[in-house]
Image: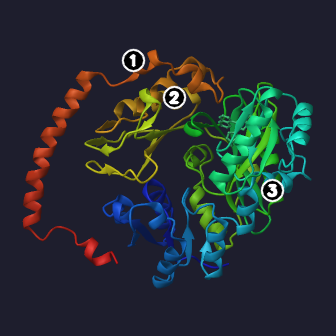
């Protein structure tokens, strides 16, 4: 047991703020780090202390593990929360943090390492009774040998990079005659993308759903599952809409998958919050895919339906506390849906759209949660992920959650950049989504060009918002002039930034 008094959040934007909120709830002091591009960001202002760690590109700031550890030493920080992305799944970083006597809020470096390699992950769980897609459990080294295996598995097959994940480095091979060519391409791709050319083969599961299970494990041997999230609505292997619970799981299947996820966690001696990803086929067979050893973007839907604060649980586990509830205490209450609001143009292949948030008005009210890290007038930097916010709705049932999501989308006013809000509304109103019967091909299958124009803001809407913006801007200028004359302007930057 070691009480945490001060946490540094090695991240930016909405997730940095999300973590700080729980820390504050627990009476823990917070330290933000930021790049030069993020100087004025809300996560910097929200923290008790904040330190600039470098230039805008992530490899000159948010990825500088040693610099972040130095900040911790200077400011007497007890623990680092890595958020998601950046250094969150870097086993070497986790080890360096621990070696420096700082608590890493996450699993041990060994667990991060094992689950970071898809083949090692498969090997780690193979003695447990966890369903897996038929395939090779060694890297493919001999092409003709691999071809024999591929034939046994049956086409179509999928080639995956061992060091990949999140869909990177995958290739479908429809028939044997394409095998040689595809495997060579896959190996080269894996080499250049990950510096590791190991690839393996699996049977290709057609039209799968992506269902993942949230788990929590403490250092006292307790490992619990906090049910599933259905994450099938994605593009380019990036999720856009997630919900909990899944509309298609039965209580029996939920329990079985939950128990499988707990076994995966136990197989790698997992500690903290983690997510076990499964593929599910049309017959509701499920297969272990990979484990994400971090807090995930879409964790709010689980928080809504289970009434837990996952970040608080992470912190308590990192302190060495036992989880103070049991599997039987956990139950699903209601339904939650998350929409990732990206600065992207859904009508143009979800192309990132950078620019200024000229108008930014959040939805409010019952059953709505907005996790964001920007304010009106700010630029969406080009250096990082273009996610503006996460809009999450909650209702006593799925229908109510959908209705509230639609209301919140309509109430959300964003001007200056294109966003995925219109796509979210399209999803909420689509029969396949409403029925709950959809899979990972949703976008490709249903989001056709003719849909796109009808879900956009109409011109009069935009004209009206632009007029309001012009007016607001005038007023803002006057207000700023007045403010700048006085000494009212908070001096937090000078006081706190080092
Ligand atoms: C698969 C698959 C079909 N069969 N594996 C994509 C991300 C990576 N985590 C694994 N992925 C897949 N693995 C077999 N054997 C289909 C996918 C897949 C997918 C999985 C989850 C969410 C979206 C997806 C989109 C396309 C393909």
- Residue underneath mark 2: 402
Tell me which numbered mark, 2 or 3, is placed earlier along the sequence: 3
Q: Is mark 1 within 8 Å of ligand 1?
A: no
**Front one among 436 and 121:** 121
Q: Sort mark 2 into few (<14), some (14-19) or many (20+) by Cα contacts within 10 Å.
A: many
- Image quarter where the N terminus lies is bottom right
Q: Which residue is the site of mark 1?
A: 454
In the rendered image, residue 467, in percent from the top left (x then y), is placed at 16, 33
- Residue 479 placed where, x, y %? 11, 54
What residue is at 86 percent from the left and 50 percent from the top? 138
Q: CA distance from mark 1 to mark 3?
A: 47 Å
The residue shown at (48%, 62%) is 11
Instruction: Look at the image and tell me whether residue 165 can be seen.
Output: no
Q: Nearer the viewer, residue 270 or 315?
A: 270
Residue 397, relative to residue 58: is it above or below? above
**Distance from the alpha carbon under mark 2 to that under mark 1:** 19 Å
**Crowdedness near tag 3: few (<14), some (14–19) or many (≥20) residues, C-alpha within 10 Å:** some
Q: Is residue 55 left or right of residue 208?
A: left
Q: Would residue 136 be visible to someone looking at this image?
A: yes
Is the CB–ligand 1 distance for label 2 below 8 Å?
Answer: no
The scheme the figure's colours follow is rainbow
The mark closer to the camera, 2 or 3, is 3
Quadrant occupied by the C terminus: bottom left
């Amino acid at each position: 047991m070691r009480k945490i008094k001060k946490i540094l959040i090695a991240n930016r934007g909405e997730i940095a703020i999300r973590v700080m909120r729980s820390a504050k709830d627990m009476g823990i002091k917070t330290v933000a780090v930021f790049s030069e591009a993020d100087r004025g960001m809300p996560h910097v202002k929200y923290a008790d202390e904040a330190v600039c760690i470098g230039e805008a590109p992530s490899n000159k700031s948010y990825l500088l593990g040693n610099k972040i550890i130095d900040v911790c030493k200077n400011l007497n920080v007890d623990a680092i929360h890595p958020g998601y992305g950046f250094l969150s799944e870097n086993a070497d970083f986790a080890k360096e943090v621990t070696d420096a006597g700082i608590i890493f809020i996450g699993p041990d470096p060994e667990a991060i390492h094992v689950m970071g390699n898809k083949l090692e992950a498969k090997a780690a769980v193979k003695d447990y009774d966890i369903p897996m897609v038929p395939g090779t459990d060694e890297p493919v080294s001999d092409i003709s040998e691999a071809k024999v295996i591929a034939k046994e598995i049956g086409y179509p097959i999928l080639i995956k990079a061992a060091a990949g994940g999140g869909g990177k480095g995958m290739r479908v091979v429809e028939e044997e005659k394409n095998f040689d060519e595809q495997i060579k391409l896959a190996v080269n791709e894996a080499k250049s993308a990950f510096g590791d050319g190991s690839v393996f083969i699996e049977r290709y599961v057609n039209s799968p759903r992506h269902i993942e299970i949230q788990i929590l494990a403490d250092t006292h041997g307790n490992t619990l599952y906090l049910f599933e999230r259905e994450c099938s609505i994605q593009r380019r292997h990036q999720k856009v809409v997630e919900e909990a619970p899944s509309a298609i799981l039965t209580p029996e299947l939920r329990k079985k998958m939950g128990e499988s996820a707990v076994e995966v966690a136990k197989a790698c001696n997992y500690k903290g919050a983690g997510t076990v990803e499964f593929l599910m086929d049309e017959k509701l067979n499920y297969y272990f895919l990979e484990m994400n050893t971090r807090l995930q973007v879409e964790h709010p839907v689980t928080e809504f339906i289970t009434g837990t604060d996952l970040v608080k649980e992470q912190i308590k586990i990192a302190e060495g506390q036992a989880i103070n509830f049991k599997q039987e205490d956990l139950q699903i209450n209601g339904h939650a849906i998350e929409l990732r609001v990206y600065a992207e143009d859904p009508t143009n292949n979800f192309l990132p759209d950078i620019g200024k948030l000229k108008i930014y008005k959040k939805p409010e009210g019952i059953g709505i949660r907005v996790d964001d890290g920007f304010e009106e007038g700010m630029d969406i930097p080009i250096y990082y992920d273009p996610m503006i916010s996460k809009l999450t709705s909650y209702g006593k049932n799925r229908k109510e959650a959908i209705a509230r999501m639609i209301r919140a989308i309509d109430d959300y006013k964003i001007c200056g950049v294109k966003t995925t809000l219109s796509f979210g509304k399209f999803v909420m109103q689509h029969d396949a989504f409403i029925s709950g019967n959809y899979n990972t091909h949703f976008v490709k299958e249903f989001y056709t060009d003719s849909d796109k124009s009808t879900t956009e803001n109409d011109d009069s809407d935009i004209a009206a918002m632009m007029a309001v913006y012009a007016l607001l801007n005038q007023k803002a200028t006057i207000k700023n002039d007045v403010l700048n004359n006085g000494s009212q302007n908070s001096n937090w930057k000078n006081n706190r930034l080092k």
